[in-house]
Amino acid sequence: MTETTGKYADFEGLRARAVALRQEGLSRRQIRDRLHVDNNDLLNRLLRGEPAPEWTRRPNAKDDLRAKARELRLQGMTYDRIQVELGCSKGSISLWVRDLPKPERSRTREESSAIGRRGWEATLQRRDAERRAAKQRAAEEIGTLTERELFLLGVGLYWAEGSKSKPYRTQERVTFVNSDPGMIRVFLAWLRLLGVDDQHLRFHVHIHESADVAGAERFWAELTGAESAAFGKTSLKKHSPKTNRRNVNEDYRGCLVVRVLKSADLYRRIEGSWYGIVLGADPANRHDVRFGGN
């Protein structure tokens, strides 16, 4: 539908009404609904040059970026150039400057592609910085755990990652396996909270035979602080030449098995505590709780 046909034939009259409504403080959506304009391009032309009312400008972290993007667009920059300058996604830039005139293209396809690649790299860097900042904020919110918090965390951690007795195989002993050093640290701190003596701990390293076995053994020994006598023989995972291993970087150190000797009573306490957590989270599940294995 063009401005000269159909219900939009009187463009100037429609623009005068749109401007008047804008000056009364109406938002774009309100003007669109009031004038029954369902064409966004036409709405942009009707409101061109008319600032949005203050009440529609909700403050957010991107306000400064939006203003800078509009300034750069008015200077004749393309989306790619603005992306390089500000590290914003082109989708956001498009929303911010779509009512402004398009600059004339003066670059070759190769130059534009190079600018686009730099813009994407800037976007990736910005996203990475945002991810790291979000993780840092989340870490700072935790603070020091109380003993109760650590106890509940440890129970959930064990029930997710530790070995469990089965109806078809009663095996009430505490064994925990994981490759994440952080998980191992938390689990050992939890065992200390429960009063488990270091003399009751045994460790085993499980790792691919083609990895740095000696380096992994040293790493886990330093992390746990355990004596060499507490470590059993390392288990090597064998594979054929066709095996395509993905965990080949220098941070790969296999898995550590942590076993607690004479731990039947401890296992029962863990199992009972886990069901207590289930009940505490949703008392409606009380009739579904069954002891004696999964």
Image (cartoon, rainbow, N blue to C red):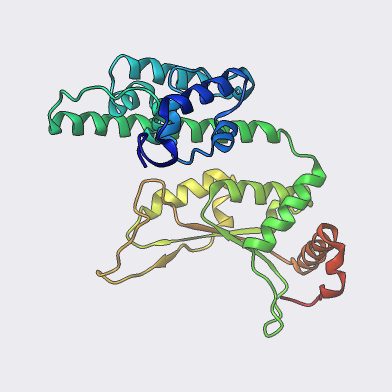
**Can see residue 259?**
no
Q: Quadrant of residue 54?
A: top right
Q: Quadrant of residue 70?
A: top left
* Residue 139 on image: x %, y %: 62, 35
As drawn, the residue found furthest toward the bottom would be 168
* Residue 146 on image: x %, y %: 79, 40
Residue at image x 25%, y 32%?
Answer: 116
Residue at image x 31%, y 25%?
Answer: 84
Image quadrant containing the N terminus: top left
Question: Compared to 16, does 155 lie above or below?
Answer: below
Question: Compared to 136, does 178 lie above or below?
Answer: below
283 sits left or right of 37 in the view: right
**Can see residue 3?**
yes
State the residue in front, 112 or 262.
112
189 sits left or right of 177 in the view: right
Image quadrant containing the C terminus: bottom right
* Residue 284 on image: x %, y %: 86, 66
147 sits left or right of 120 in the view: right
Q: Quadrant of residue 61?
A: top right
Residue at image x 30%, y 30%?
Answer: 119
Residue at image x 69%, y 46%?
Answer: 189
Question: Compared to 67, does 267 lie above or below?
Answer: below
* Residue 282 on image: x %, y %: 83, 61
Question: Compared to 39, does 15 lie above or below?
Answer: above
